[in-house]
Image (tube, rainbow, N blue to C red):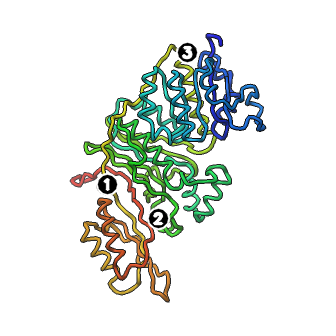
Amino acid sequence: MSENEVGFAVLGAGTVGGALLKYWAQNREFLDREIGAQLSLKAVAVKQPAKSRPQWIPQDAVTTDIEGAIRNPDVNVVVSSLGDNSAEYAAIILALSLGKRVVTANKFVVALHGPHLYRLAREHGTELFIEAAVCGGIQIVDALQTRYRANQFHSVLGIVNGTTNYIVTKMTAGATYAEALKEAQQLGYAEPDPTADVTGADAACKLSILATLMSGEHLSPTDIHTEGIQGLSRQDFRNASEFGYTIKLMASASFSDQGIAAWVAPTLVSNEHPLSHVSGVKNAVYITGDPIGYACLEGYGAGGDATAASLASDLMNAAAHIVKGGYIQPMPTCSAQVRNVPFESVRNMQYVRLVIHDRVGSARDILAVLASNGVSVFQELQSKRRMNRTRRLAEWVIMTDEGTEGDLSSALKEIEKLDVFYRMGSVLRVLETEFEDADLDSDD
């Protein structure tokens, strides 16, 4: 290999790896010019070498030998997009141990093993690039690692999963959950097995990575309270719309002296909040800190092109660092143990939809239980909507003032034991618009 050449290998040529290879083939002159050297593809590791592939993937570069592709002395950068967590973890470990720069879009591996991978990269004088692991085309990782490094972060709040955002956008327009999911799968936004997306697991991994970068403490996905969108009904969306809210799957982490309070859950977002208007497969991340105040980054978060854009940027940066003589990007050191705030102590406003027996005093009994557990009602969103006149069942919807998750959980357990209780509908968080306090003494 010539001195003015940077070799790279791509592990996996599926949706993600294939999109990157297509971008490389169509933009080779641009990439070489920007990097200052020839970016040469040395290997494409796949499971099925005889499979018909697009013309932009050189057949002579295709191999089934993953380890051989990584160990190839002409390979300086390894792009790992295998789609298999255990295989990808092993591949990244090997590449970093050999001093190769690594680019990956695997948020599960980074979220669970980030501290070890960062430490290994530092020990071998190399880098781990993870831009494509979080929010597709937003480039939030680079922003946190470079542009916003001078800030002490207070919180991060965002829509970080494009698949679920597409589904809830369709449900806002009247589709059922099943209809919206099927359409997302047909368009390629959702996998045949959408479990990781719809349960919130994917969003939890992305929040884990963001919170770790912002706090310097490794927040594992297992430390994050996580709820999915499977239980949402069209009635929840109708209620939200009627009273000025939109439902989104939100990822939230706040940083304080007590530690990190983090959760992923469906949330009623005020229509006056900027995140309420982020629709379709778009992602948006809203961060606050000192001295920046706040910043919001928005862009496409699902699909091969958005991910390929981040992979290509990381590949370019990795190659450029080699050309410049070994520049190493800042990476979090990650403290050994996270200071995790128990979810029961987290404070939120809540939306509660109950199905109750429609009788005199039913609402009074429920309100009494809420009050005895320290939960106050901010607003009764809807008076009792009769669901079944014969059985005298009605739906009752309330919004609570801000309180702890533990207090509301205790209250709901008691409510379930009441004679008036029939079944639980939905329990969702509520995000209001943040306004500065008004000057009540002003004459204006």
Q: Residue at x 42, y 43 (%)?
A: 208
- The quarter of the image holding the N terminus is top right
Give the labeled residue for mark 1. Answer: 346
Q: CA distance from mark 2 to mark 1?
A: 23 Å
Can you tell which quarter of the image residue 31 is in? Answer: top right
> How far apart, in angstroms, are the residues tagged by discs 3 and 2?
53 Å
Distance, label 1 to label 3, CA atoms, is: 47 Å
Q: Is the C-beta separation of discs 2 and 1 under 8 Å?
A: no
State the residue lying farthest toward the top: 3
201 to the left or right of 170: left
Q: Does dot 3 land on a helix, a strand or a loop? A: helix
Mark sitting earlier along the chain (2/1) = 2
Q: Position of residue 214 (x, y in %)?
A: 38, 37
**Residue hosting label 2:** 240
Q: Nearer the viewer, mark 2 or mark 1?
A: 1
Callout 2 crowding tier (Cα within 10 Å): few <14, some 14–19, many ≥20: many
Residue drawn at x 41%, y 73% is 354
Return the residue nearer the eye: 45 or 20. 45
* Residue denoted by label 3: 323
Q: Nearer the viewer, mark 3 or mark 2?
A: 3
Furthest toward the bottom, the residue is 390
Say which label, 1 or 3, has the lower sequence index. Answer: 3
Q: Are marks 3 and 2 in contact (CB under 8 Å)?
A: no
Query: Can you tell which quarter of the image residue 265 is in?
Result: bottom left
Element type where label 2 sits in the image: helix
